[in-house]
Amino acid sequence: MDSMIAAAARALMAGDALGALKRVSLRDDPPALALRGIAMAQLGEHPRARELLRRAARGFGTHEELARARCVVAEAEVALAMRDLRGSPRTLAAASATLGARADHANALHARLIAVRRLLLLGRLDEAASTLEGLDLRALPPSLRAVAELAAAEVALRSLRTAAAQAAWGRARDAAERAGVPALMAEVAEARDALDRPAARRVQAGHEQPLRLEEVEALLGSGALVVDACRRGLRAGAAWRPLARRPVLFALACALAEAWPGDVDRDALIAHAFRTRRPDETHRARLRVEIGRLRAVAAPLARIEATARGFALVPPDERGVVVLRPPIDGEQASLLALLADGAAWSTSALALALGASQRTVQRALVDLEAAGRARSIGRARAQRWLAPPLAGFTTILLLPAALPLT
């Protein structure tokens, strides 16, 4: 490694992308191309960075496995920044194994952290948590230690363990300060702000109150009957009844919970659950069937009793009933939550993260664009979608596959 390459590498480690480019911008040998690609990625020029890294990998050839593996890891990180989640994780795993076998443990751990961040974007929290537990964080340099702790904080936040998230954030802050990289310190500070922003709305007896994540955690642990509109289910203490795939039952549960301790008229329930303003006997018969199904699902969390004019929700042991609503309304709330990070997402990546078809996501994006809540850049396969930052609250509870408390 010549002196200019070494100096450029040191500049990149310190976050000085321009300083690195000054040393290698006119060179086309594979090491210089790789460093130029990393520098362009740090400057946000991701398509150009990916091109340079691919050229570097081809230039190294098959006889330089270590250098090629480093290029694969760098390209995987660029793909993650571009929200291109279509690549096979096996390629990254193979590169990590090559780096570990060649004693490049820092880059091997970096590759595994990229895999963890990809799993978080896809909502696979169990896999991300198990991968993090297998990492020896003591062996990481400060910059990678900060990234690992940020990932641990996100896993804790999305499973509503705010104390663990606070502790991980504190360790991430200390590591970022030791690394001395301004962009990393800013990312850590931004992650900490999520704890202080409203994350949901509590609706009870006609009154609405914003809640932070720690207040949501306290509410779910209080034993009250919670109709959770963020995760679409019923919770009372440790008991959880998912209703995400039963929208009619969930709509009925929400209507009954919002009216508690009163009851809800049958016609109002039909209008809310079946979206019709002119109910007939067939709708009333269907309502009786759906109420019966809801009774079976909700037992023993609550009873549903018939009244003279409709139905009422009756929790056991005089527990309160609360509706937990997301900070933003609408059927596209989870889609907006993904776009809220400010990154440019492809339709395929959004579909992977949401577990929906690309056609469904495309229709939703068109509706959001017409409403001025999202915008697209590029065309065809290069098209990406962005939304303005949703300032003032956190969308942690709306992200894909958030875990219910156990």
Image (cartoon, grey):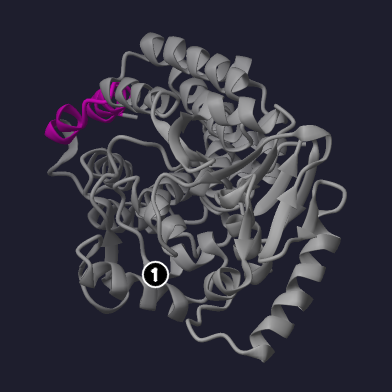
Q: Which stretch did the figure color magenta?
A: 2-22
Type of amino acid at the residue the image marks with label 1: Thr
Local secondary structure at mark 1: helix
- Residue 231: image location, x then y, percent: 60, 51
- Residue 224: image location, x then y, percent: 70, 34
Using the rendered image of the protein, determine whether residue 148 is visible from the camera's viewpoint: no
Name the residue: 80% across, 36% down: 238
Is 261 left or right of 64, judged from the image as shown? right
Is 309 left or right of 14, judged from the image as shown? right
Name the residue: 41% across, 61% down: 330
Q: Quadrant of the C terminus?
A: top right
Q: Main secondary structure of the magenta part?
A: helix
Q: Nearer the viewer, residue 182 or 106?
A: 182
Q: Nearer the viewer, residue 14 or 255?
A: 255
Q: Quadrant of the N terminus?
A: top left
Residue 384 quadrant: bottom left
Using the rendered image of the protein, determine whether residue 96 is visible from the camera's viewpoint: yes
Report if residue 7 lies within the magenta region: yes
Name the residue: 22% across, 27% down: 4
- Residue 367: image location, x then y, percent: 30, 73
- Residue 76: image location, x then y, percent: 45, 50
The answer to whether 188 is drawn above or below residue 57 in the figure is above
Residue hosting label 1: 347
